[in-house]
Amino acid sequence: MASEDTKNIQEMKTDLNLLLECLKYQMDNPFSQKEALVTIFSICQQNSNAGVYFREIGGLMFVKNLAKSSKHSMVKEAALYTLGAVAEQNVYCQQTLCTSELFEDLTWFLSNDDSNTNLKRMSVYVILVLVSNNRTGQTLVRETGCITVLTQLFRTVLSKYELNLLDENAFQSYQLWSSVCSTLCVCVNNPQNDENQMLCCSLFPHANDWLINCVKPEIIRPVCSFIGLTLANNTYVQKYFISVGGLDVLSQVLVQLESDSHKTLSSAKLAVVVTKTVDACIADNPTFGVILSKYHIVSKLLTLLLHESLDSGEKFSIILTLGHCTEDCEENQYDLFKNNGLPLMIQALTESQSEELNKAATFVLHNCKKITEKLSLSLGEYSFDENEEQLKDINMKEKNLEEYWKKAKEILHRIEQLERERNEEKLQREKDKHNVSSMNINIQNTLKHLHADSIGRGPTAEDKDKSKSRKLQSYQSHGVLSTACTNDHQMKTVLKSANPVTACYRESGQNKNLCKANSSYNQNLQEGTTFEKKNSVSQSSDRVFKHPVPVVKNRKQQLPVTDPFTLCSDIINKEVISFLASNNHSKMLKYRCSGCIAVGKSLNSRNFSKLLHSCPYQCDRHKVIVEAEDRYKSELRKSLICNKKILLTPRRRRQLSHESTASGEIKKRRIRKNFTEEEINYLFNGVKKMGNHWNLILWSFPFQQGRKAVDLAHKYHKLTKRPEYAAP
């Protein structure tokens, strides 16, 4: 293999040397020179090292001089195309060709009236290659005046708005104009160049005229790309674009394309392109979203989002635009709320598996949080120019929303009332405890006095003993025994209502219903009211004894049917009820149970079980629960197969994960992705605008997939330690 590679490299070098000699000795034969240049291009395309060797032997500079000095147009075109292809393949060749002399020659080719359309296309192609991902090239294209010539070509190449691509001359002119658009896009961005953006913003009025007069994919795509990249991350250029009516023009084009999207698929795709341009315009200036509210862009975007032909990337662009529209504009927030946009965002969260799409939907929901709180006060403040039937529908929806808000307020009032009753019961319970302790002290004092009187006195002490015993009986019957007088029926009903397992599954079932976003917004509100009512019932049941509420870590995942707690709940209920049916429950214990006393403590499924097991004075009710739980766990361990492991606690889960990694399995790590210059610019712009809110920065800019807020924070702190980034 090594010998074959060496042989191929040697043959490649020989061919390039022969072709370079052919170019030098065939100056009078343009056809031979053109064929030699095409052959050099093909060799450099097949072998990445060929361009480096061709530069080392001086071939690159010879072809550059040939393009300048040759009298034949076909040789100039072939030489320029070869230069562009070699520079595109190799960075070193790009840096070698990136000189002011070559940019001046290319400017002369573009401005010369004798140059044909194909020669101008090749010149534009070389400029595109030299400027792409090269800040030095962006500076040279501005200093040599080449960008001024490109802007002039953008205005003059296509003179008619009625574009006929079937005509050969019109098609060549369109190809030149499209190449000029692409080159201008590279001049202003990737990397971003503020000075070039300021120069290119003079083309906005001309671009607006094209968007208004020619709604075709061949025009809209390059124009929107040029506008979007020229606007990106430049507040001054964005304000200028809006001042010349650019955002109004984009809104009108978007409305027209959205109406045509139901007929043709291409209109829906073009509408997404225009949506991205609108997003670039308002991303750094959310207050400009007020202009979009005049055209009801939010409702149009929601309709476009439901189009079946769109992929996840296009839906992400639409949802991100919705987020920027609703970030600082209450009119757009209300429009989103009125057109059932919130259920669509919830549906996108539940159904989509794309991390970026979920972040964008969360961004929209976060923006609409304020309007949901102010909705009851601002329902009548919006007036829209619509037909009478549409106004009636809006009024009906507003009345329904008012009714739902009234119900929600009633539920909040009930919850506050229940909380007040619970606080009063706590205070009363503390008073009772204080009374019991004071009565116990009084009883002890009376017993001491009785004992002393019985020793020192005769029959009068017996009379006092009788009176004191009567007081003792009255105290006991009033203070202690009255708390234990509850019948069997009350205890059964309280136990059923306070069962933690059934309450947990009742809440989880309700949460599953709330997570479904396919239903309308009214149905979601009704489910929310029923959820609040059931929560109030579960809160009122905690006054007897407090059980730990199990924490549901992921509401999207459904709980398995064979969960140990669901199987254990029926057993506990039956045994407790059967035990309470007997006469043993009437026996009073001398000491209080820890499970009954610890009502005000923060309990969960772990510390409550430990609390019951460590208590030596368990009441009958908690004793039955502990015995049933232990018996069920022991039977479950016996029935399991040896190689299957049940995860009863988080500590055990960590031990199993350490055992699995120690046994030879290799943990999967994330693939390292270096930060690009564009991402670093996003990071500094986000910190400048939003501060150290890393999650908000991650949502607002298109970082690479897999980035986390912690990654942004670490990268920013590392960059600020460097001297060149000390003051971004």
Image (spheres, helix red, strand yellow):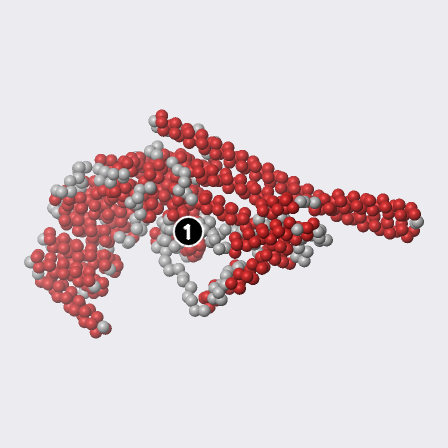
439 sits to left or right of 611: right
Image location (x, y in percent) of residue 330? 42, 35
When asked about the image quadrant of residue 719, the answer is bottom left
Extreme residue toward the top, this view = 388
Judged from the image, the secondary structure of the residue bearing numbered disc 1 is loop
Extreme residue toward the left, this view = 28
> Relative to residue 395, is residue 318 depicted above or below?
below
Residue at 63% x, 52% y is: 579
**How busy is the neighbourhood of tag 1: few (under 14 within 10 Å), some, or many (20 plus)?**
few
The N terminus - image quarter: bottom left
Q: Is residue 595 visible?
A: no
Image location (x, y in percent) of residue 30? 8, 56
Q: Which residue is more in the foreground, 109 or 362?
A: 362
**What amino acid is found at the position of numbered circle 1 in the picture?**
Ala
- The residue carrying mark 1 is 727
Q: Is residue 390 visible?
A: yes
101 sits to left or right of 362: left
Image location (x, y in percent) of residue 721? 43, 56
Residue at 34% x, 27% y is: 387
Residue at 42% x, 51% y is: 727
Image location (x, y in percent) of residue 632? 56, 59
Residue at 53% x, 64% y is: 638
Q: Which residue is more in the foreground, 582 or 528?
A: 582
